[in-house]
Image (tube, grey):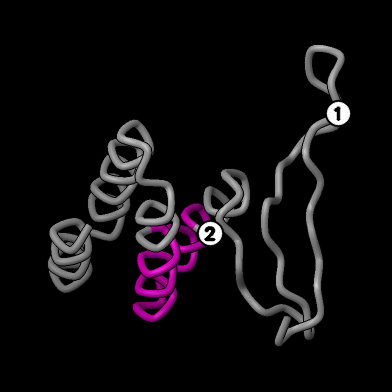
Amino acid sequence: MSQALARLREGLAAGDAYEAQQVVKTAYYRLRARGQLQDGYDLLQASAAAQFGAAQFTCGLELAKLLIEVGGVRVSAHGFLMSEMRIGCREEGRDAPRATLAPSGY
């Protein structure tokens, strides 16, 4: 994970935000395939923040969207913590997991 973040920062410093984003996405999918979900979520969150911090809003937004879609959101938003978020309703006749919201501090 730290190698991907280092490459992200190098890419941002060199002005190549898109290439840096692709490095992060590749690293995330590798972590996910190995079952290292929390590391993958952490990587996406840190990378999206770095992209936003470098004013690379499109790339940052794409990483943030991926973080939400895969369920790694644990970010305070208007006093709530969100986790286990999944996009979708019914799949193969089963209910999809729903977002769990709890007041901050819980």
Give the residue displayed 78% in from the left and 39% down from the top. 97
* Residue at the farthest top position: 92
Give the residue displayed 28% in from the left and 60% down from the top. 17
Give the residue displayed 34% in from the left and 31% down from the top. 33
* Residue at the farthest front position: 106
Give the residue displayed 67% in from the left and 59% down from the top. 83
Q: Position of residue 60 (x, y in %)?
A: 46, 63
Q: Number of callouts in the render?
A: 2
Give the mark, 1 or 2, whose residue is nearer the N terminus: 2
Please tell me whether the stretch drawn in magenta is mainly helix, strand or loop. helix
- Residue type of the residue flagged with mark 1: Asp
Q: Which residues are magenta?
A: 44-63
Q: Position of residue 66 (x, y in %)?
A: 53, 48
Q: SS at mark 2? A: helix
- Residue type of the residue flagged with mark 2: Ala
Quadrant placement of the C terminus: bottom right
CA neighbours of label 1 inside 10 A, class few (<14), some (14 to 19), many (20+): few
**Residue bearing mark 1:** 95
Q: CA distance from mark 1 to mark 2?
A: 25 Å
Is 51 part of what is drawn in magenta? yes
**Residue bearing mark 2:** 64
Quadrant placement of the N terminus: bottom left
Left/right placement of residue 61 relative to residue 17 reads right
Q: Position of residue 79 (x, y in %)?
A: 78, 85
Is 50 part of what is drawn in magenta? yes
